[in-house]
Image (cartoon, grey):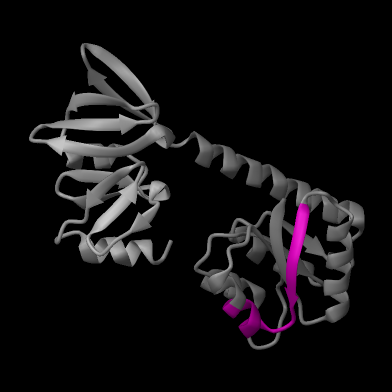
Amino acid sequence: MIKAIAIDDEPLALELIQEFCSQTNIISLEKTFTKVSELQKYIQNIPIDLLFLDIQMPMLSGVELYKSLQQNVMVIFTTAHSQYAIDGFDLNAVDYLLKPFSYERFLTAVNKANELYDYKINKINSEIQYLHVRSDYSLHKIPTADILFIESFADYIDIHITDSKKITTRMTLKTVMEKLPKNDFMRVHRSFVIPLKRIEKIGRKTIYLSQREIPIGVNYEKEFFTRFNTQ
């Protein structure tokens, strides 16, 4: 389901959005806000997919608030004044709801958000899921999810994958890192690249994964622990 939050300086407007969301099987309304400062604090720490945002609010307009957000989130603007619709669509809003709006009109907007959400998810899932390498006169298509770790030997690397297999190919770790999803893999030593999700435990200078001990290089130690502690 799409995780959503809503902000409006009118509590009754929030109650209506909450009621409409409860009638769909698309939206999970996580929280509602009447104060901009509370929403800003919340959204800094918790990822969401969709924001129902009133354009006219005291102190800071909905348009200004949306522009200030660091998180890339879909937005459906709500307002009682139709002249603000252009401002909303200039920001690539999913839709614009003119108060008072019916459940049918609300559902139209939510369905648009759902279509965009599905498109984004499918796009993410289609990106870099395989590593293509040549070995033994063949082209191998390796699912990145199956990689246990990668070890280098001069100009060659061993790609260790599940089922106790490994594929040797002529390539450097620098080159293979350019082909792998950056959020999932990390170089931790001049001779090793690992998938972060497979880490089982960490010693002072050692990473334990897949029944192997991988050393942490001095030049990679600071970056590794910084990144690992934010996972």
- Would residue 40 be found to the left or right of residue 219 on screen? right
- Would residue 152 be found to the left or right of residue 80 on screen? left
Tell me, yes or no, if residue 38 can be seen here: yes
- Would residue 19 be found to the left or right of residue 188 on screen? right
Q: Position of residue 13 (x, y in %)?
A: 85, 74
Residue lying at the far front in this picture: please name it: 211
Tell me, yes or no, if residue 99 can be seen here: no
Q: Where is residue 81 in the image (x, y as percent from the top left)?
A: 79, 71
Quadrant containing the C terminus in the rendered view: bottom left
Foreground residue, 115 or 222? 222
Query: In which image quadrant can residue 102 be found?
Result: bottom right
In the image, residue 162 sits, relative to residue 191, either above or below, namely above
Foreground residue, 101 or 206? 206
- Residue shown at 52% from the left, 38% from the top: 125
Residue bounds of the magenta highlight: 27-41
Residue lying at the far bottom in this picture: please name it: 59
Q: Tell me if residue 33 is in the magenta stretch.
A: yes
